[in-house]
Amino acid sequence: MPAYILAIDQGTTSSRAVIVDQRMNIRGVGQQEFRQIYPRPGWVEHEPEAIWRSVEHSIAAAIRNAAIKAVDIAGIGITNQRETIVLWDPKTGKPAHNAIVWQCRRSAAICARLRKRGLERLFTKRTGLLLDPYFSGTKLAWLFENVAGLRAKARMGSLKAGTIDSYLVFRLTGGKSHVTDASNASRTLLLDIRKVAWDEELADLLGIPLSLLPRVTGNSEVYGKTKGLGCLPDGIPISGMAGDQQAALFGQACFGKGDAKCTFGTGSFLLMNTGEKPARSKTRLLTTIAWKLDGRTTYALEGSVFVAGAAVQWLRDGLRMIKASSDIEALAAQVESSDGVVLVPALVGLGAPHWRPEARGIISGITRGTTAAHIARATLEAIALQNYEIIKAMESDSGLKLRQLRVDGGASANDLLMQIQADLIRRDIVRPKLIETTALGAAFLAGLAVGYWPDVKAIARAWKKDKTFSARMDEDARRDLICRWDVAVGKA
């Protein structure tokens, strides 16, 4: 069998390609950024061709850096920014419009219109999601309502739609495959997550023809083979796909019911594996498909914090308290506590479980003795407190007790933040040796489909931790911190 797996990690600002060997070592990485397009305030677009070029460049660079031959690749896995939507001509492959990015808020009026009609409950019951511009369905609806000619092209069959995974498979297979995986499909507002099938009624409410949507597949199977590419030979199977957060959950080997991970990035994303039955949230978390393997669907609860690492970036760029984001740990460690200072980083509103877009950031508890170190520590506490709220909601919704929280993402390297997180949730925080968990998840899914790894048990055995953080904060101090946070959030 060929010796390597190629994982494509197509993100919001750049594309990465990672070469993984059978012992789960990363042998080579390639990466290229691409342009962000902001036509109006609150609108975000990507040029699909620019995404594709960045993927091609990253693949070639990863192969070169790994010093391997492309013919030695056994399978290709894809993970991607999830809700971003693309329309293209299936005959030419030419995009019909720029991709509408998950961050884009242009469909807010459509969401408000649907809520006014009392339809949010129906959408949530079927899809596990809320009516929010975040998700793909209302983005598609906006395109059909506002771009002349698109609806007519869709009716004639000269238009296809899909999230980034779907678009990449189409390009990798020379236009042969139009598919999406269950995890990405569950982020569209169009999928009945219990049936794992497109919902005709919801599509009709959004004015979207089902004929232009891709076939929904599992997360680990062969979707097609490479054809007509400059960076890869023909015939390599594309054999694994998952949205980025689900891929990270898989890459963290969170295969058991109640297993959970948190990715610390610009925001933070928490997912808990809830098993083969979807947990209905009463706290406005999202119910989503984690993955579908061998015909069996695994579900997850998800909570998103809009501002995590972005709060540190604000201290760096806005307040100029630090020169580099990594400097915050040393600054915050200069004091033993935040001394009553609370920072609520609602810089773009509050995400789960509050869902308050009108909320604004505040800093409270400042005295004459407050220093930059206190504000830095309060910022780290704010990141951890937001995650504490989500974990508390997850345990309530699922009826499951979190055993530990596995972490990844850039800010997971901050030992002080990880310790504060452990203190607040009173569970162990476990950081893995390999923090490329999103790409690894895609690689694992691809490798399982082609027999590169025998089963998930082999992956779980190979998963290795770097460090464990256990709670050590005094309980009275913990309660006081949470109480002050609750009061401050109420004022935000």
Image (spheres, grey):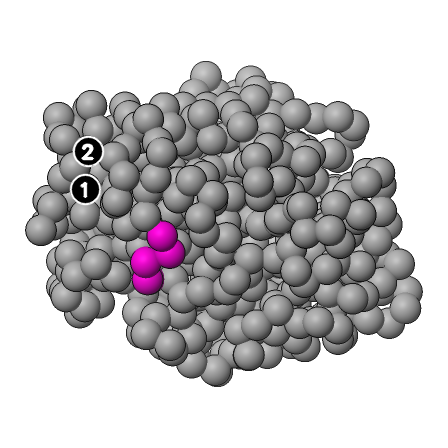
Using residue 489 as the reference point, say whether residue 237 is left or right of it. left
Q: Secondary structure at mark 2?
A: helix
Above or below residue 82? Residue 282 is below
Q: Secondary structure at mark 1?
A: strand
Q: Is the residue marked by circle 1 packed among few (<14), some (14-19), or many (20+) residues within 10 Å?
A: many
Identified at 38% across, 47% down, the residue is 78
Residue 250, image x, y percentages: 33, 59
Identify the amino acid type marked 1.
Ile
Of residues 81 and 209, the one nearer the viewer is 209
Q: Is residue 448 above or below residue 31?
A: below
Q: Main secondary structure of the magenta part?
A: loop
Viewer-side residue, 246 vs 158: 158
Please state the extent of the stretch shown in magenta in the rendering: 220-224
- Residue 190 visible in the current orientation: yes
- Toward the viewer: 69 or 66? 69
State the CA–CA distance, disc 1 to disc 2.
6 Å
Task: Relative to 180, say whether 317 is above or below.
Answer: above
Q: Is residue 95 above or below residue 191?
A: above
Q: Is 57 part of what is drawn in magenta?
A: no
Q: Is residue 45 left or right of residue 425?
A: right
Tell me the residue at 20%/23% (across/down). Answer: 64
The verdict on residue 222 being magenta is yes
Mark on residue 73? 1
Q: Badge 2 is on which residue?
A: 70
Q: Amino acid at mark 2?
A: Ala
Contact (Cβ within 8 Å) of mark 1 with mark 2: yes
Is residue 384 among the parts visible in the rendering? no
Q: Quadrant of residue 330?
A: top left
